[in-house]
Image: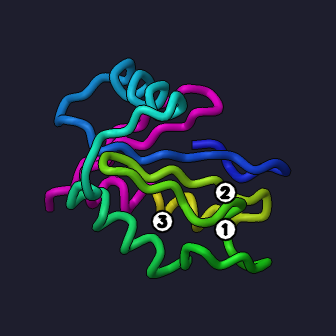
Amino acid sequence: MAPCTTVSFDLVVWALEHGASSAEVRAAHARCRQGQHARGAPQPRVAAFYRAVIARHPDGVAAPASPWEVVPLHIAADHVEMRLSPSCDDEVLLLIERLAGEHGLLLFDPQDGSVYPPPRAVVR
């Protein structure tokens, strides 16, 4: 995942079926950009991710210390889109990545089209 830069950037977490391909994630994102969203309340994985991330970085708060460039965050039935500010800390990226993994979500970087699967749990 790219570090924060001097311009804002987006990250999107997706709750697609287990084993979804990168192409399927990109296609879902393209549909979102066209205004085509899955109907209904956020899936439990999406809702749990959203609650966890805003517990650390509240949504709707336009403050200099906020990592969000745009509020409120875009939350749909199957995804959460986050536009991060240029001044966000790398800690925010690590938190998003960790929470995406904990909730079994795919992480999509629309700037370069990269799809990151949830990190595998380490069994000890």
Q: Residue 45 carries which label?
A: none
Residue that appears at 72% across and 76% down: 62
Residue at the spot of label 2: 84
Q: Which amino acid does label 2 sit on?
A: Leu
Callout in the foreground (3, 1):
1
Where disc 2 sits, the SS reads strand
Which corner quadrant holds the C terminus? Answer: bottom left
Give residue 94's position: percent from left, percent from top: 51, 60
Residue that appears at 37% across and 73% down: 51
Q: Do the residues labelled 2 and 3 touch (CB within 8 Å)?
A: no
Label 2 Cα neighbours within 10 Å, binned few <14 / some 14-19 / many ≥20: many
Label 3 Cα neighbours within 10 Å, binned few <14 / some 14-19 / many ≥20: some
Which corner quadrant holds the N terminus? Answer: top right
Which is nearer the eye, 79 or 38? 38
Q: Do the residues labelled 3 and 1 touch (CB within 8 Å)?
A: no
Label 1 Cα neighbours within 10 Å, binned few <14 / some 14-19 / many ≥20: many
Determine the CA span between mark 3 and mark 1: 12 Å
Residue at the spot of label 1: 67
Which contiguous range is marked in magenta? 97-124
Q: Which amino acid does label 1 sit on?
A: Pro
Q: Which mark is residue 95?
A: 3
Determine the CA span between mark 1 and mark 2: 5 Å
Earlier sequence position, callout 2 versus callout 3: 2
Q: Do the residues labelled 1 and 2 touch (CB within 8 Å)?
A: yes
Which is nearer the eye, 71 or 111? 71
Earlier sequence position, callout 1 versus callout 2: 1
Determine the CA span between mark 2 and mark 3: 13 Å
Tell me: 111 left or right of 12. right
